[in-house]
Image: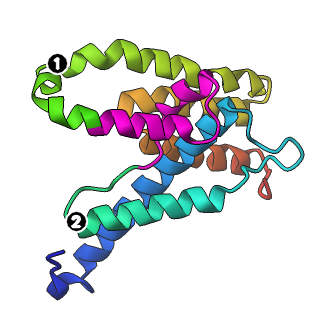
Amino acid sequence: CQFEWDNILSLDMLAVVFTFLFIDMFDTVGTIVGVCTKADMIDKKTGRIPRIKQAFMADAIATTAGAMLGTSTTTTTYVESASSVAQGGRTGLTAFAVAACFAIALFFSPIFLAIPAAATAPVLVIVGLFMMSPIKNIDFDNYAESIPAFVTIIMMPMAYSISDGILIGMILYVALHILCGKFKK
């Protein structure tokens, strides 16, 4: 909590705040939509996610608390949650069990730090596989819908960022719909 109030209203600070805002927002939106789709928690009639406001509030509080404590933006929504959803987790008990395991793992961190990052790749491939099932809902005959979805899927691993993939996909989605004359959509 050692704030630098001198730069709070500067143009540089505004750029940093907006950058982190959009990175955190796109990461959270992408993860929540992906995990809720996998968990079949999206309302069939409205296409909305129940209690999404609470999920965003939890993410906002964690991000703010992390920033106040001097860390980079904290992410409270993890795409890895798809693995717990695939095993039947829906209530948050799986998240609590994982948090307890992380707390225990703190004591063994020197051992875990010896494992190279590349060793986690197979697990991430499996998590990515869990997230691929909603692709069957994409209308591939409608290019204005399918091209942005394809580019989003491809750009996430290429940019090594969920938020960058979503951002590029959203820009392409808007551009294609404008070119097709579907301004309202």
Q: Is residue 146 magenta?
A: no
Q: Residue 45 placed where, x, y %? A: 90, 46
Q: Identify the residue at horizontal 18%, vertical 86% (top origin).
A: 5
Residue kind at label 2, given as amino acid type: Leu
Q: Is residue 172 visible?
A: no
Residue kind at label 1, given as amino acid type: Ile
Q: Residue 94 placed where, x, y %? A: 52, 34
Q: Is residue 65 visible?
A: yes
Q: Which residues are magenta?
A: 76-103
Looking at the image, do the residues carrying marks 2 and 1 touch, with CB atoms under 8 Å apart? no
SS at badge 2: loop
| Residue 141: quarter of image | top right
Q: Which residue is mark 2?
A: 69
Quadrant position of the N terminus in the picture: bottom left
How many marks the image carries: the answer is 2
Which residue, as the protein is rendered here, is positioned at the far right? 45
In the image, taking residue 119 as reference, residue 145 lies left or right, namely right
Mark 2–mark 1 Cα distance, whole angstroms, equals: 28 Å
SS at badge 1: loop
Q: Which residue is mark 1?
A: 115
Asked if residue 27 is positioned above or below residue 54 in the image, the reply reads above
